[in-house]
Image (cartoon, grey):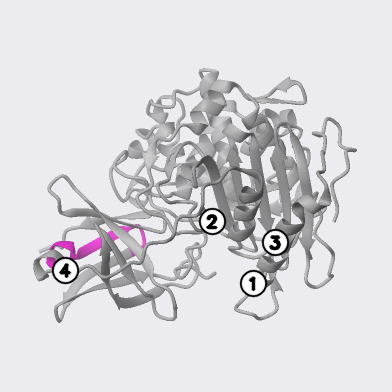
Amino acid sequence: MVHMLKRWRLPIVTLLTQALIAAPAFAQQPRSDYREFEKVVLAELKETNTPGAAVAIVRGDRIVYAKGFGVSNVETGAPVTPDMLFRVGSVTKMLTAAVLVSLSEEGKITLGAPVGYFVRGLDVRLSRLTAHQLLSHSAGLIDFAHTCCAQEESALAAEIRGAKDADYFFTEPGRIFSYSNPSYHIAGYLIQELTGKPYADVMDERLFRPLGMTHTTYRPTTAMTFPLAQGHDAVGTARPTLVRPFVNNVGDWPSGYAYTNVTDLARFAIAFMNGGRIARKQVLSPSLIATLSTPYVDVPFSWDVPPGFFEGARYGHGFFIQEHRGVHLLHHGGTINGFGAFVVIVPEHRFAVIIFANRTGAILGKSLEKALELSLPLKPRPQAPLKQAVPMTLAEMENYAGTYVNGALKIELFVRDGKLFRKESYPTTVEAGPGRDFEAPVTKVGTNRFAFTPPGEITAAEFILVPGSGGRPEYLHSFMDAARRVEARP
């Protein structure tokens, strides 16, 4: 998710009225139906030191609940309302994917063909990628996200045309899922080049306006004309502080920079769950929805935020897809400086929940789960198995040992005094913030599954090793990123 917070690795009222033209009808259920849910939201805001949140719940073809909680700005104390815009980080990806797939349905691009057949300006190896690989995070590209500072809308083309193959790939395309914001930067560039218009204009013309998402935008100067929640950082229990300035990098808009509110994004969910129709108008084609909803690649391992939402997940185009407590879900979250967001869509039950929060990395997982429990026939939550250390022989540990690399990320597994250790080096960069360099002992907790406790953390983190054809580990996968094993030079 990006702008997904990598836990220890990166730094980290009222209902909206029906006055908007063609807005879906609100069918507010009795307030008592949501009293338990509201208690969970308020408790989780306090527990996570998050100033505020906005929530929308969809049933069928309407918003049945929309409410703001807490404050939008700790300095002014202004309350959050459902019409307030939030930055939604990687939730943006489902929007970018929808528009690029719509262009493929019009014959402007073929998802399975090299993108160089359709657009110019890419280095040779990048031009051989397919739109399918880009949208499914299987292109073999590294992950990074800029927070600063290109403001001109020419920056997207400049970033992509300036991209060098050698700087972008960590492995061959089609080998493994590895979350990559640059994949979606390229997807946005394709949208721009295929239409001959700026990316933000195409998104507005082809998706936002047809759906009635009248407040959704990428442009900060437009966002500031609407009610706008302010982003916050918080360290521990210290009072949250505003993020200043608002981060903006036009070259990264397609992966995580949309401003929207919960009621606008609910319109996308309504169309998605109702065959592409909203307010008696066909906006998205059923075939487009099917393409976005199809699981294409396995997600070997992901951080468990919210708990249980990535177990056994696969990735489609702009969505994680999985079974969760017996229900088929599509979801995506995102974090970006000052904000966190998560969206769950349940097509079979025509149900969706959208929660935005105004603190960096805030994913209100307990609130999401409570909304699902109150609305869906979920199976009981399975009891988490007790994880016990699995003995490793010296030969096993030596087989695991090696250096695994993805861009600036370098992870070493090595044996010392008969034990396996993980050493991680992640340099300080503009994109990622303060780096980290540490080593920690590793415990095996399952088949190809391992745990370690980073310095300063209380709970263990996990990773898996993905074997190649000969059984020797080829990739280390953790926190949605794959790192490829590289051979030491003689």
Q: Is residue 171 magenta?
A: no
Q: Which mark is residue 392?
A: 4
The residue that label 1 is drawn on is: 47
Mark found first going from the N terminus, 1 or 4: 1
Q: Are marks 1 and 4 in contact (CB under 8 Å)?
A: no
- Please name the amino acid that badge 1 sits on: Glu
The residue segment tinted magenta is: 397-409
Graded by Cα atoms within 10 Å as few (under 14), some (14 to 19) or many (20 or more), the crowding at tag 3 reads many
Q: Is residue 169 above or below residue 246?
A: above
Q: Disc 2 marks which residue?
A: 3
Q: Which residue is mark 3?
A: 41
Instruction: Kindly identify the amino acid type of the residue bearing the numbered disc 2.
Output: His
Say above or below: 487 vs 269: below
Please, what secondary structure does the residue beneath circle 3 have? helix
Between disc 2 and disc 3, the foreground one is 3
Q: CA distance from mark 4 to mark 3?
A: 43 Å
Which residue is pictured at 41% across the width and 59% down the height? Answer: 479
- Of the image marks 3 and 1, the number of the one nearer the N terminus: 3
- Element carrying mark 2: loop
Alpha carbon separation for disc pair 2 and 3:
23 Å
Would residue 219 be found to the left or right of residue 324 on screen?
A: right
Q: In the image, which is nearer the foreground, mark 2 or mark 4?
A: 4
Q: CA distance from mark 2 to mark 4?
A: 36 Å
Residue 148 image position (x, y, % from top left)? 58, 60
